[in-house]
Image (tube, grey):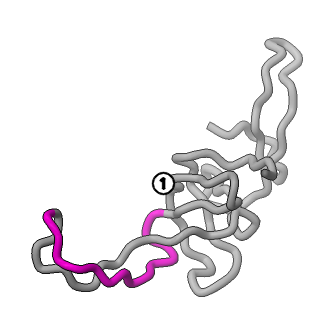
Amino acid sequence: MRKTYLKKGDNVQITTGRDKGKKGRIISINKMKYTAIVEGANLVSKHTKPNQDNPKGGVLKKEAGINISNLLLVDSKGKPSKIGKRVNKKTGKKERYFKTTGDLVK
């Protein structure tokens, strides 16, 4: 299990692949597989049989996982940036910051 600086709810941009350049919010992260599910990106077709939730069945579109190395966090100006971690000298707590601007991640 590798460590990641991304968290659920972060706004990210996809850097490679079919959805390159798309921006979205992280819905969930799987640390064991090192993947994240991004809202509206990497849509795949899933064929389902009729069941109680979906009586007609058919083809559903749903998001699939994207490798975390292919995601960059988006800052307040809308530009993608790498993230770093540092310890705040006053409080002693760890904080995430954008490496390009030095601003804190909110």
Left or right of 46? Residue 82 is right
Residue 44 or 58: which is nearer the viewer? 58
Residue 69 lies, with reference to residue 100, above or below; the image says below
Residue at 50% x, 57% y is 25
Q: Which residues are drawn in magenta?
A: 39-52
Image quadrant occupied by the C terminus: top right
Left or right of 9? Residue 71 is right
Left or right of 55? Residue 42 is right
Q: Quadrant of residue 87?
A: top right
- Spot occupied by residue 2 in the image (x, y as percentages of width and height): 81, 52
Q: Amino acid at mark 1?
A: Ile
Residue 4 or 89: which is nearer the viewer? 4
Instruction: State the residue position of label 1.
Output: 27
Question: Outermost residue toward the top?
Answer: 90
- Spot occupied by residue 74 in the image (x, y as percentages of width and height): 64, 57
- Spot occupied by residue 49 in the image (x, y as percentages of width and height): 23, 80
Asked whether residue 50 is drawn in magenta, I would say yes
Question: Outermost residue toward the left?
Answer: 55
Residue at 49% x, 73% y is 41
Residue at 17% x, 70% y is 51
Q: Quadrant of residue 81?
A: bottom right
Residue at 28% x, 79% y is 48
